[in-house]
Amino acid sequence: MSPSPHSPIGVFDSGVGGLTVVRALMQRLPNEDIIYFGDTARVPYGIKSVETISHYATQITEFLLEKEVKLLIVACNTMAAVASQVIHDLSPVPVLDVIEAGTRGAIAATRNRQVGVIGTLTTINSQAYVHTIHAAAPDIGIHSRACPLFVPLVEEGWLDHEVTRLTAREYLSPLLELDIDSLVLGCTHYPLLTPLLKEVVGDSIQLIDSAETTAQQVVELFEQTGMANPDPTPGSHQFFVTDVPQRFQDVGSRFLGQPLFHVHVVNW
Amino acid sequence: MSPSPHSPIGVFDSGVGGLTVVRALMQRLPNEDIIYFGDTARVPYGIKSVETISHYATQITEFLLEKEVKLLIVACNTMAAVASQVIHDLSPVPVLDVIEAGTRGAIAATRNRQVGVIGTLTTINSQAYVHTIHAAAPDIGIHSRACPLFVPLVEEGWLDHEVTRLTAREYLSPLLELDIDSLVLGCTHYPLLTPLLKEVVGDSIQLIDSAETTAQQVVELFEQTGMANPDPTPGSHQFFVTDVPQRFQDVGSRFLGQPLFHVHVVNW
């Protein structure tokens, strides 16, 4: 059976981070059904190899395609950075990812053509943002920095804490010396640090949150393809995880901005 | 074939942390062969469920038993905390773990019978140290605290950094108010923070490093059972990991105190 406008959107991530994308989608497209997959037993991906991440991405893509989704959204920068091709090759339905979205946001935002990018070790080492931004705008200067402690700090809930502020200053000060005017939050955990990061980088630097730009891209895609769900009732939201859901529900409700229901466990 | 005194010792952990135990073993028992298993593709375990960790522990135990080890050492507090019984049930050879070792160390060290324990979320939530210490010494007061940021801080290499100092003060200050005289480092990453932790807790509190006490237990076990390797030549050391070994070698050499060779990848 081919996917129809009534089919769900599939969103996936290594853990809870992609819920920031689900949240943006729920706001922009409240009548779409969404199936979310978070690989909570094997999280985090950001310190793992390309081979391992590609293997995991393949498993998740196949799982969501069996659910007959009409669109796949890779809501994990690390997977988008190193396994994008694998996912595109497998999928008969359109695939959007947070790196394309962040790229579009950065190109639209920068005035002085100097852009900063922060993310996990694997995302930054992959140079994925450099390749994607330069493919569209080769004149933009890109200055990257891995920030491995931001994910555990967000998961600890230290969103407005002196330790996080000090860590952010240490990570970001080399970027701030480079006269950037935009900073891509290249990890779906980072939008939760937005108030603190704004304080550290100041008003002259715009933060690019790829969750927002991803939701905008979905709206545009559906306008072009006529695949928006015409049903006016509120969409259903289902969540699949690979570990027991307790922690996913606790931490995830912070990401989603509301309590999390309909969580199912997949035993891999 | 039954294991003999010439058989290797099997040591396992979720990642690199258990190398602190290997280091202690290499110092105390330089002519023993050691096979180390680090589940680097699925690390960290400390935020995962009991079911998931038991499943992983079973896989690793079976792998090492196929290598005909004469002794299994669970060098991961999280696995020892929640999967100890599973491992014991599977193994025909003796099993030692870092929680038993830390328990022995704490009971021997405390004078005022007030002991602190720090570890990952899963280790602390399991109450494993409380059960093990109370089984041997029910009069000891035990005060526990999960320190989820210590592992990523150690892996970032911020062993002597203001962020780590501030984090340690925040985590440990409730314990310091409770008049403990010993503090169990209930995670094999933590011995790398020993100088900083000593500074934060002061001279009156003794730090219990389970790597050292584990090595001591192995020496005693071999004396009792006659299973020490009689061969006077230096032992061989092999390392098996589940992710590509680059990062394991980089970070692991910091734990082992020397460069890491003979690293093999297991594709699960």
Image (spheres, coloured by chain):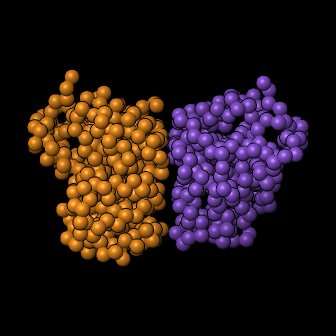
Chain colours: A orange, B purple
Residue at 73 percent of width and 71 percent of height: B203
Q: Which residue is more in the foreground, B109 or A155?
A: A155
Residue at 39 percent of width and 33 percent of height: A59
Does residue B124 show up?
no
Q: Is residue B240 left or right of residue A209?
A: right
Residue at 11 percent of width and 39 percent of height: A225
Does residue A41 show up?
yes
Q: Is residue A44 left or right of residue B195?
A: left
Q: Position of residue B198 (x, y in %)?
A: 68, 68
Placement of A167 over or under A29, stated as above or below: below
Q: Which residue is more in the foreground, B222 or A51?
A: A51
Residue at 31 percent of width and 33 percent of height: A90
Placement of A43 over or under B116, stated as above or below: above
Q: Which residue is more in the foreground, B62 or A143?
A: A143
Q: Position of residue A145 (x, y in %)?
A: 40, 64
Q: Position of residue A242 (x, y in %)?
A: 44, 36
Q: Position of residue A249 (x, y in %)?
A: 40, 44
